[in-house]
Amino acid sequence: MDWLQAFLPLNLERLSVWIGVLCTLAIYSLLYRENPIYRFFEHMYIGLAAGYSLGPLGVDILYRYWIEPIWIQGYWAWAFVVPYGMYLYFIFSERYGWISRIVIGTLIGASAGLFFQEFSSRYLPQLNSTLQKPLWVSDANPDLTYGMIINNILFVIILLSVLTYFTFSYEQRGPVKRVAIWGRWFLMIGLGAIFGNTVMARMALLIGRIYYLLNDWLMIRVGGG
Amino acid sequence: MGMITNLMAQQTIWRLPEESRALFATLIVAGAFVLILGLIPVLQTLPPRGRRAIIVTVTFLAGLFFAAEFFLPVDWTAIFPKDDPKRNFLTPAIQPAQNVLQIIGALALGLGTFGLVRLHLRNAVQKRPQWGYSIVLLVSFVVMATLSILNTLAEKEIVERGPVLERAFSILFDYTLVQLDAAMFSLIAFYIFSAAYRAFRIRSVEASILMFTAMLVMIGVVPLGAQISPALPTIANWVLAQLNAPAQRAIEFGVGIGGLAMAIRLWLSLERGVT
Amino acid sequence: MLSVDRRWLYLILFVNIVIFLLAPLRMPASISPPVQKFYDEIEKLQPGDLVMISSNWSASTLAENQPQLEAVITHLMRKQARFTIISIEAQSRDISYRLAERITKEKGYQYGEQWAHFGFVPNLAVAIKGMVTDLPNTIKQDVRGIEVTKLPVVQGVKSLSDYKMIIDVTPSGTVPVWISYSPKNVKILYCPTSVMAAEAYTYLDSGQIKGMITGAKGAQEYEQLLGIKGLGAPFANTISFSHLLIIFFILLGNFAMLMNRLQARREA
Amino acid sequence: MSYQHAQDNWFAAIIIGFIALAVLVNIWRARRGKELYIRRIPGLDAIDEAIGRSTELGRPVTMIPGLTDFGVVAVQALTIFKYITKQIARFATPMRLLCGNPTVFAVAQEAIADAYNEAGRPDLYDPDNVRFLSDRQFAFASGVAGLIQRERVAANFMFGEFFAESLIFAETGNMVGAIQIAGTISFTQVPFFVAACDYTIIGDEFYATSAYLSREPVLLGSLVGQDIAKLLFALTTLGGVIAASIAGTDAPIIKLLGQPGGWEAFWNSVLGGGGQ
């Protein structure tokens, strides 16, 4: 029974495969119904993930941005940051709870202030690239073909009608309403396209997992080759 | 950046002396704790309006810093010829400010982890229903936290990375956690199937449009589509690039503007949202 | 049919994938221009030319990236090119190292002489900048703990600009980093997953990327160009047929719904 | 193609200034008592129905603010959940708010405690109902999926920024027959919510949600400002494509409208290189 000998988790490499397979099957058991095995792995998963984060996201950050600057480089002003951040920990106290809001206010203010750059970087170049879509052939744009013109006109029409649908502060009536309905239909085309395009990536994930089960665990050659 | 750090290095007032630096650092940190936490009884004497004023001010100042850094001109060479024309006087402070936010984030992680552990400890101690699973969670948490922290310290060469640590970490992280990630991620393939089967029906104009585009793209992007008709991949790509892109962009514009308005309201504490 | 238990759907999908993975079915693929360009670029390599492979995928995207990496390494070995692999985290290091070791052993390619694995670097941008100025000091040692300066495969190599080509096999946005920081004389080839490919066409147009293999489908085309039997073909076929299955069931569901409606109308 | 500072193209500062002005002026008008209209958003009318069903069945309501880092999106999500919690508090319906980011978790604790206070039921607030599960994407997803199935939730609200895990939440919720309302700014996840949820709030309807639910003048006024900003974007697009058709896509005026570096290119061409 050479196959069995190779199949069983008798060395570390095989053991790793067996653990991976066990995890996979336990998670897949959720597809049948929620059950004790899934529950066991779910709790283990969350425990492991929570424990893991403490290394790179807790200790590493505190060491790099707080301990090292103070104790090793000697920049003492950093000393105040952690006690200030610790105001957050008053959150569970009824009497002192409001203190944590000072830190929360800092975070909210910072994310609001940062949004100006994000808005500029993320949306203005998009606005600009929308403008580079000429609607007719002219000497100014010699490389343009009629196919591109049609695409450009479509692009602008769809953009404007979807934008119309997403207005809120007035009652959409008459022609505006009709444009908004068209906008919603165009939106559905976009959503359908994204759905169809994502299916492939998700199937590839599952195929990868099943390949792992077949090839790494059961040691069956895939593709009949 | 180099110039700034040099400047900072020269200003010894911001740096502790090299001699017995560890001792001074410990003292200063202890002092900072006493000072900042000692402020609490003082803050506590404030009436509700004063408390609100403090929160509003802090929010505004934090926002002002990042906003000012972004909006202020960077090119001052007309007045100060030696200035770097790519930054203004606030730019050097951006990285430290980001580090402060990172530190607060790390402390929040502590808070979140505390909440998680407290819930499951209570479950276990009070023997609430299903408390066994809470034990599973706590045990895997403690083991993994120990290994992960040791691993991080080993990366910084503070502790030795022995073969036991390496082996154990690899079993729990690479062989278990990563496998669980992959399994959970691939679950979506099943769900995408059942969702499509259930939702894609010719019920209304909208639902039909959604269904037909999804099917068209689905068949167009796989090799089989090209076998059926060479036009299919072209059409699918055209739908993705020419019909999907403008709809997506319109939504992006709306989201950007909505976010901007929200940011302004939050910055100026104009809405009674979460604080 | 309308209220079918979804668990049947799950089972059917699972069985469908298993069957098409095991079936010795190979449908011909039409070669797309980016894949052809990719192939032509590697064909231009001379024996002994040095290639850097950046491999950043792990278990999740195995079905798309593994056939790509296998096909690429096979082609490089056929051209007798030397290559080194680098990753950005531990899992992709392990998986690419194991894979490369297996493939090279089959063809008798020598570790250290003809190829090596540089392990992983936590910050790609910093690492690339470092490799451009001083490669041995940036990498220091390979995955087996041998000092880079003692590896015959990169003997005398000072900088990334001594390489002929960079091949990025990845499910994440690493290619803009390679484009931004690597030397201008080194060509970049790209093996993305299907989702990431759409964003890369601009780089392809501008020539910043010289060729692209997209997901399992691209790998299938590449295998056909090489004339080998790899995993790309079965994976791509299985994806095709799972799409077909979903479409079939959507149509079935609609058919059942129409039947129900007809019946209801008749009864009324 | 990104902005480090507004000076990369002062157009950014101008357009942000204009939007800010439109928003602030309309907030001011609304505060002075101007009646403002907001169009119907069907999904949001269903929130009360979903809460009602939860109350009837005595099964919990779940709220998921997505996996985003703390920021503007997360604050908006929590604002919506705060409103929902106030409704819930009136009927003493059980609730679970599940977080995938520790900072969001901290702020959520405050917001939910507040909501119960404002509803006059501080006794119902239990910190254990606001939970941080994991900041690891699929560990979070597994926890949420498990909880939804075990507690057989009757209503599931998902608001915020979502990634691939969206469908795991939505399909599991669908499996247990929960009424599901999702609102997200992540365009790529909208199709999955549309397929698996009862109602989907798309794009910046997400930002309109709190105005719709609370009808607070400040928020309604802000919406008017946002619509004006959208009109501005639409006009820029129209004007821009016409300009590009006449003058070419490389024309300085096109670069001025949003491209980093476009400001200088424009003034250099106008002033013959004499501009700064």
Image (cartoon, rainbow, N blue to C red):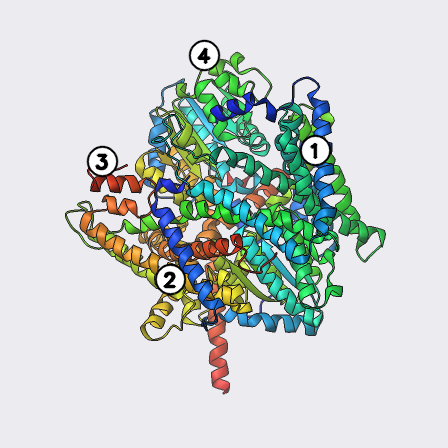
Nearest-to-viewer mark from 2 and 3: 3
Task: Give the CA distance from mark 4 to mark 3.
Answer: 51 Å
Q: Is residue D72 above or below residue C223?
A: below
User: Which residue was labeled with disc 1?
Assistant: B149
Q: Residue at x 71, y 24 (%)?
A: B24
Relative to residue D58, is residue A137 drawn left or right?
Answer: left
The type of residue carrying mark 2 is Ile
The chain letter for the residue carrying disc 4 is C
Marks 1 and 3 on same chain: no
Give me the disc on residue D158: none
Relative to residue C60, is residue D258 drawn left or right?
Answer: left
Which of the pair B241/C73 is nearer the observer?
B241
Few, some or many C-alpha atoms within 10 Å of disc 1 (few <14, some 14-19, many ≥20)? Answer: many
User: Which residue was labeled with disc 3?
Assistant: D274
Task: Give the CA distance from mark 1 to mark 4.
Answer: 39 Å
For mark 1, give the secondary structure: helix
Where residue B7 sits: x, y (%)?
51, 23
The chain letter for the residue carrying disc 1 is B
Task: Give the CA distance from mark 2 to mark 4.
Answer: 63 Å
Relative to residue D37, is residue C34 drawn left or right?
Answer: left
